[in-house]
Amino acid sequence: MTEPDPTTASRTSDEGWYVDDRCFNCDVARQLAPDLIHERGGRSEVVRPPRDEAELRQLYAAAHACPTRSVRLAGRPLDPARDPFPLALDDGLLLCGHTSRHTAGANSYLLRRPDGYLMVDTPRFAEPLAARFEALGPVTDVLLTHRDHAAHGRAYADRFGARLWIHEGDLDAAPGADRVLRGREPVEIAAGFVAHPFPGHTLGSVVHLADDRYCFSGDSFYWSRTTGDLEVAAGVTWYSIEELAASLARAVGRLRFEWLLPGHGDRRRMPVDEAARRLSALAERSRDLRPRPIDFTSMRW
């Protein structure tokens, strides 16, 4: 997704936590501290102070993940010792945090494989972050789900000595990619790790599926807290909503997963059969979608 213009007006909690006027409503902070940070007036706001250490950890996670560093503590800098990233979501699955303005706050992930880690999309590039990720083990591949998330791909791939992957439909966003996916058929790029070309949000969008367990959906579909279901960003589709509907139809029966891990929108863990049922229902709902103007306010976070 492309970053919209930020709004104005800072909002401060009684205990000093606040969201400053650089917030552009990417939802990252609300995913990490959903009871403490809400969407109000098209942006994030701290609605109450933390009640215990667990909630305080959530606020620090939100602050260190925010692409504009807008979640702040009045009068004090953030304590770097309270940076939880990379944050374990499951055994061998980590959330990178430290999202970037240049990817509109897209989430990125590390997944452990037998010969090292795969990075799906990227956080902002900084040498201390790269060193922190590399300390976990070698990163062999950096996989870009689509053009909107390509900003730091080459930098991370070069730093790790990794292969950079993108689909040919979005190759102009990463022309120096080391591996180029082609066509629309699934491709196994590592043992148990399959790239599913998914044109729609962009021409070169890809959904990556690992072990029939982890689904890295980029911006093709996500979990909405508002609707309590899988959704597509119908109002933020750069290439073709009809092609996205066709990609979803092809995915039914092919994508079996337990974890939904999008770039934008919320993550969700659910039983495999429930995920399959919800994906089938999303494909059916999407059949009737038609093109409309880009509208970031239409996102149902």
Image (spheres, helix red, strand yellow):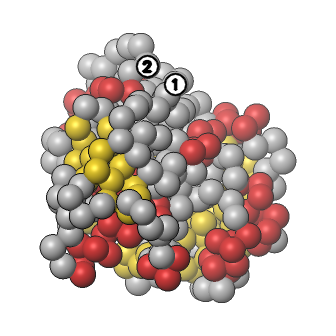
Query: Between tags 2 and 1, which lies in front?
Result: 2
Residue plotted at (24% across, 81% down): 53
* Cα distance in 3D space between marks 2 and 1: 8 Å
Q: Earlier in the sequence, mark 2 or mark 1?
A: 1
User: Looking at the picture, how far across and down is residue 299, in whole percent?
Assistant: 31, 33
Q: Residue at horizontal 63%, vertical 79%?
A: 132
Kind of residue sitting beneath label 2: Ile
Q: Is residue 45 visible?
A: yes
Left or right placement of residue 188 versus residue 151 in this view: left
Q: State the residue at coordinates (76%, 34%).
A: 172
Toward which corner of the image does residue 40 lie, by quadrant?
Answer: top left
Which part of the image, by quadrant, shows the C terminus?
Answer: top left
The image shows a total of numbered marks equal to 2
Residue ID for mark 2: 294
Please, what secondary structure does the residue beneath circle 1 have? loop
- x, y percentage for residue 8? 40, 32
Q: Quadrant of residue 130?
A: bottom right
Q: Is residue 56 above or below residue 153?
A: below
* SS at circle 2: loop
User: Can the viewer see residue 165?
Assistant: no
Q: Which mark is residue 256?
A: none
Image spot of residue 131 (x, y percent): 70, 78
The residue carrying pointer 1 sits among few (fewer than 14), some (14 to 19) or many (20 or more) residues within 10 Å by Cα, namely some
Residues under numbered marks 2 and 1 in contact, where contact means CB atoms less than 8 Å apart: yes
Which residue was labeled with disc 1? 238
Along the viewing direction, whichever of 184 and 107 lies nearer the viewer: 107
- Up-down relation of residue 273 to residue 51 (above or below): above
Q: Residues within 10 Å of mark 2 (few under 14, many from 20)?
A: few
Q: Nearer the viewer, residue 172 or 14?
A: 14
